[in-house]
Image (cartoon, rainbow, N blue to C red):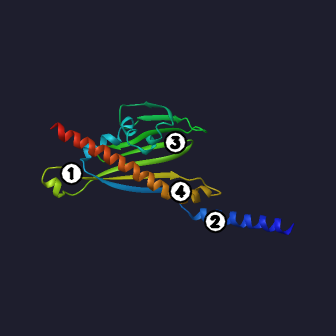
Amino acid sequence: MKWILRTILVILIVFAGLIGIGFFLPATQIVERHIEIDAYAEDVYPLINDLRVSVTWDVGAERGSQIENIAFGGPDSGVGQTAAWQTNQTPPVTGTREIIESQSPEFVRSESNLNGVLTTQTFAISDFAETDAAVDGSSESVDVLLRTELELDGFPYLDRITAKIKEGGVKSKLDRTLKRLKTSAENQMSAFSKEE
């Protein structure tokens, strides 16, 4: 009987400790990653300001075989454009994304809802100072920053601990997204150069 009480006490102490740790962790998980892209800001911006185009390079699109249907709404691009989808997983994942703010060719901010979990995603494009390549007229590079903000639940604060544990996976996913964006933008620039 004593070992049962001790086990319960240990579980309660561990649980209380986790609550204490979670209390001191931030209520919002913010993860930032960036990448250099050999393209002009004006060429990268349309790729992130149109949800119909972003499905070709966004890491979420890697689940393409699992997405049962995707519907777009609102304007052709920019603020107010929406996307909604559902996967054929069990249980299904339903999601929506809406562009809530954009300014050409500097940034695009969108809000996603995946099964009730809200995430804000911001792409910011900044020009590098002139590089040797830009001076000789061949191309210019931009730095693209991808920032995600995830609001975490309050008491018992366990989501905050889980988010901290999963942060490495989030960084990896953002890196893959940026690499795919880089490939898409640079391929587009390469195709445009060949046409000239």
Mark 2 or 3 closer to N-term?
Answer: 2
Q: Estimate how packed mark 1 is, as few (under 14), some (14 to 19) or many (20 or more) residues with alpha carbons within 10 Å.
A: many
Q: Which is in the foreground here, disc 1 or disc 3?
A: 1
Secondary structure found at label 3: strand
Residue drawn 51% across the image and 38% down it: 95
Q: Estimate how packed mark 4 is, as few (under 14), some (14 to 19) or many (20 or more) residues with alpha carbons within 10 Å.
A: few
Residue 109 horizontal side relative to residue 43, left or right: right
Mark 4 residue type: Lys
Question: Which residue is more in the foreground, 132 or 46?
Answer: 132
- Disc number for residue 166: 4
Q: Which is in the foreground here, disc 2 or disc 1?
A: 1
Residue 102 horizontal side relative to residue 29, left or right: left
Mark 3 residue type: Asn
Mark 1 residue type: Glu
Which residue has dot 2 on it? 20
Mark 4 or 1 closer to N-term?
Answer: 1
Question: Which residue is more in the foreground, 51 or 154?
Answer: 51
